[in-house]
Amino acid sequence: MAFESLSDRLQATMKKIRGRGKVSENDVKQMMREIRLALLEADVNFKVVKAFIKKVQERAVGQEVMKSLTPGQQIIKVVQEELTELMGGEQTKLNFSLKPPTVLLFVGLQGAGKTTSAAKLANHIRKNNNKKPLMIAADIYRPAAIKQLQTLGAQLSIPVFSLGDQVNPVDIVRQGMDQARADHNDLVIIDTAGRLHIDEGLMNELDQIKEVSHPDEVFLVVDAMTGQDAVNVARAFNDRLDLTGVIMTKLDGDTRGGAALSIRSVTGKPIKFVGMGEKMDALEPFHPDRMASRILGMGDVLSLIEKAQATIDEEKARDMQQKLLSVSFTFDDFLEQIGQVRNMGPLEDLLAMMPGANKFKGMKNMQIDEKKIDQTEAIIRSMTSHEKTEPEIINASRKKRIALGSGTSVADVNRLLKQFKDMKKMMKQFMGKAKGKKRNPFNLPFM
Amino acid sequence: MNFFNKMKDKLTGKSTAMNEKFKDGLTKTRKTFAERMNQLVKRYRKVDEDFFDELEEILIESDVGMNTVMDLVDRLKDESRARNIKDTDKLKDVIVEVLAEFLTKDNEETKLNMNPNGLTVILVVGVNGAGKTTTVGKLAGRLKNEGKHVLLAAADTFRAGAIEQLQVWGDRTGIDVIKHQEGSDPASVVYDAMQAAKSRKVDVLICDTAGRLQNKVNLMKELEKIKRVISRECPGAPHEVLLVLDATTGQNALSQAKLFRQASEVTGIALTKLDGTAKGGIVLAIRNEMDIPVKLVGLGEQLNDLQTFDADAFLYGLFSELFQNENEDTEDQ
Ligand SMILES: Nc1nc2c(ncn2[C@@H]2O[C@H](COP(=O)(O)OP(=O)(O)OP(=O)(O)O)[C@@H](O)[C@H]2O)c(=O)[nH]1
Ligand SMILES: Nc1nc2c(ncn2[C@@H]2O[C@H](COP(=O)(O)OP(=O)(O)OP(=O)(O)O)[C@@H](O)[C@H]2O)c(=O)[nH]1
Ligand SMILES: [Mg+2]
Ligand SMILES: [Mg+2]
């Protein structure tokens, strides 16, 4: 179950080749096998994988890879390029109607995340495009579906149109549209009930809702954990409703999300947004290149870096790096570092984005424990400023005082002191070795 | 002798209504899987590599997952060699037999663990949107029908409308729901529910929890805490920790099973949404790679769309067209 990344997978094949220095057609075949496995483990649909491999193989045999001195890297590059291309360019542009209101219709299987995404997007567009949204509660089937949308609406101060659960959804939408026009809402968001694509009656209901609302966007909301069946679902919804885009939810999980590729290749429709959490601001634009890396098991490195950039003060980071290099790093700096990491959001989210975070040996048990960090913080805060800059002076009685003050034990204090010392030592060695080389300022001691 | 006949014998003793229900829900699954199995057998007369490749494809497309597919195909190859089977038509029996073995490994109990004397506590866990609350509602209704005194705990205090959703199920089934306000501590809801369950002398307490993705360390810790509260208030409880899995889920279901088991000692799986077109092949992978039995199956959104997982019925639904062919064949002879 510990899925290997594609680069890990190709390594063994590469070793053999390196010995010979030349790539044979058989080697290419072997590489294709590994790529196939990686994609299947990522839940890319079987047929989609087949077609994809064919394409990559053509390019691989067509010299590009075989002539290269680094065939392994070259083939990963080819795969990544092809994947990114298949996934389409970046298309997060929304279709806005020239004649308001702009109407967005949300459809999908049960539990995919329609209601949550509808509210998130209403909020997003209101903020970024300065619109005045109205949400229509057209799910009369699921218990408390209307209440769910109303609660989210109240949280965001976005009005919700509802006629309860005894009125036909098509009528609800029709009247909701009238209401929006009367109230001068220039954005209408329609939340519909989850349904199976083989449910003729309910699919027909969507046809009718579409007819009375003339949506500018019809979004299929899909759970990123969906398996092989994603193609059937996407095809059915697309054939029936001519989707304009896809929203992929729950990408904050540890799924590879191969369904993204499957859906894209059977519908040709762009994935416009991704859901990255349950909270209302956890909606992000879709990046095909990042998705490609993720499917290949290389982690969403770019998102991680971006997140770090957005929250960590550039100057401070550079300063920190300087300090780390000059070994004048003190417990105060340590504390600040912790604070900066905290600003980046829950550590588990960050870790989930790291390439292979839960796959590589050694890293396995390295789940960051936020409680431990709380503890670390408490210990440092219980030190005097003298102790923080010159930890050598911390003797037995000082340790006892710090432990008492921070609600920890002397053993905990000792552990932190040792960690800190080791870290500084490591930095020294590191400096000696890698002088001049650029280093990642986010290389945190407890990561 | 014949596996199909054995299966039929076994099944005749059972309520056919249930099998029909299973078949109804699984119609789509059954068609695609069995149809393809038949096509496969027709296309390939001989048992050879090509045949196994194609079989592999069918299984992969059903979300069985590479590891289990390889295990399965290896077993089939061994069997066909050992029994000297050269005809694909003959191998059909072996295929079904091997699948059945995968599903009923060790003849695991698929019944819910109930406390014979006193309170039974069932904790329901899983990722977001899997079908937890719905399964809680259906299960509560079923247990009440069996004459049990049931109580529900609304321990999803996070998601908008979650408490109201469970309350609707409570109203539908005429069962009380212990609840706090949205945003309150789920462990304290569970604590109150435990007290209420004890003082009201209920038979079964079912706790609904918030959806959580298994890689969220803090949320998994919250779940551990909920479970600790239950155990502290009633030694031996929870008697059943049900992991709710959406049948459309791909390989991530294995990670879910693994990490939820780590956090809450999952004792059984409820596989929901099998009424869709997802093949449910993940059941095979879960059986093969985890030691968690599938106990319940969700076949729709209504109160009665819940079934006890029955491997025989499951396979019967999956392969009923093969059964039919078998009948025709025997009649021909
Ligand atoms: N972690 C995470 N959870 C999400 C995300 N999007 C939605 N959810 C959760 O998924 C669950 C289902 O979301 P809903 O919005 O209710 O799904 P729905 O499609 O409206 O469901 P139905 O109306 O029942 O078909 C809820 O628990 C949401 O909080 C996401 O991007 N990440
Ligand atoms: N077709 C079908 N739909 C189901 C089944 N079980 C649940 N659902 C639907 O799936 C959606 C999500 O179900 P919930 O019970 O709310 O899921 P949950 O796991 O409690 O969701 P969160 O609490 O948000 O994590 C709802 O629309 C249910 O009606 C099933 O067996 N078949
Ligand atoms: Mg909804
Ligand atoms: Mg729920």
Image (tube, rainbow, N blue to C red):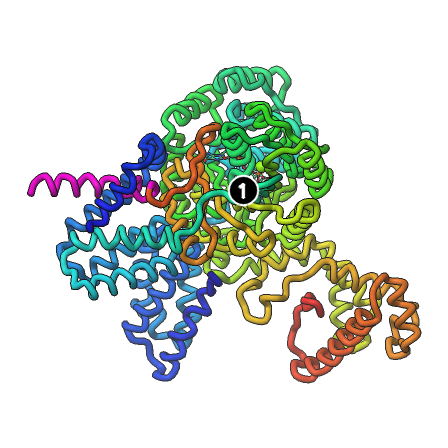
Quadrant in the picture for the C terminus of chain B:
top left
Q: Which residue is mark 1?
A: B114
Residue A371 lies in quadrant = bottom right
Q: Which element carries disc 1, helix, strand or loop?
A: loop
Residue sitting at x 32%, y 51% = B100
Q: Quadrant of residue B322?
A: top left
Q: Residue at x 16, y 64 (%)?
A: B84
Q: Can residue A370 be seen in the rendering of this structure?
A: yes
Looking at numbered disc 1 in the image, what kind of residue is underneath it? Met
Looking at the image, the residue that sits furthest to the left is B333
- Asked if the beta carbon under badge 1 is closer than 8 A to the nearest atom of ligand 2, the reply is no
* Chain containing the residue with disc 1: B
The correct choice, above or below, for A291 with respect to B23 in the image is below
On whether residue B324 falls in the magenta region, the answer is: yes
What is the magenta range? B313-333
Q: Position of residue B196 (x, y in %)?
A: 70, 34
> Foreground residue, A257 or B265?
B265
Q: Is-magenta flag for residue B184?
A: no
Answer with left or right where residue B101 lies relative to residue A81.
left
Kindly identify the residue that appears in the image at 10 percent across and 39 percent down. B331
